[in-house]
Image (cartoon, helix red, strand yellow):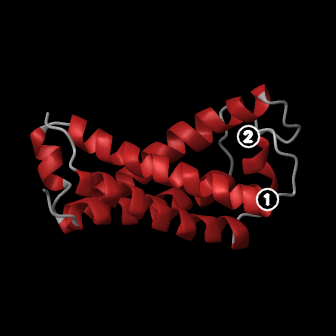
Amino acid sequence: MSAATTNEWLAGAGGGFVGSVLFGLIMMYVVPAPMLSVVIPAMYGIEGPALLAGWAIHQFHGVALGLAYVALVRALPGRVRSAARDRTAALGLGVAYGVLTTAVLAVLVMPVWLGVVGFAGAPPFPNVSYPGTLVSLVGHVVYAIPVAVAYALTPSE
């Protein structure tokens, strides 16, 4: 395993930022709950509504998860790293990363985190519901595709 290049880290961060904007718009206009203004700020002890704080935290998460995608791709076997450079295969990897982030973060981590900070509206563990989990899955996939494509389009140093 070789270290990621500066260009790869920048692609992960940039793709994560763009993907988070897209997912944030889904949260604002599709998700019925006040996810951006209340739930996300509550994860950090901020009482809502606090839309600006929610957007800032959401964008931070998106960049961090974009960097995590780069680290994950670099840690996986050579065939996966090669596939991550192919634009068509990157779409599939983006979908897979969206599924992974939904399963780990939205279904498992978020309900525990919100419960630990004492948020009264914390979802049950595991956080699986219809249509909520489906909308979350769509949002995470919409988020992850720009991350994977940005990585695929970035030249190595």
Left/right of residue 130 with respect to residue 48 in the rendered view: left
Badge 1 crowding class, 10 Å Cα cut-off, few under 14, some 14 to 19, many 20 or more, is: many
Q: Position of residue 102 (x, y in %)?
A: 53, 46
Q: Residue at x 62, y 65 (%)?
A: 24
Q: Residue at x 21, y 64 (%)?
A: 154
| Placement of the N terminus among the 4 image quadrants | top left
Residue 108: where, in percent of width, then height?
Answer: 60, 33
Separation of marks 1 and 2 at Cα, in angstroms? 11 Å
Q: Which residue is mark 1?
A: 37
Q: From the top left corner, tell me how far across and down residue 29 is, in percent.
A: 71, 73
Q: Which residue is mark 2?
A: 43
Residue 6 drawn at (x, y percent) = 25, 52
Q: Amino acid at mark 2?
A: Met
Rate crowding at label 2 as few (under 14), some (14 to 19) or many (20 or more) other CA atoms within 10 Å. many
Question: Which element carries disc 1, helix, strand or loop?
Answer: helix
Nearer-the-camera pick, 33 or 3 = 3
Secondary structure beneath disc 2?
Answer: loop
Which residue sits furthest top? 116
Judge left or right: residue 64 versus residue 117.
Answer: left
Q: Residue at x 36, y 51 (%)?
A: 96
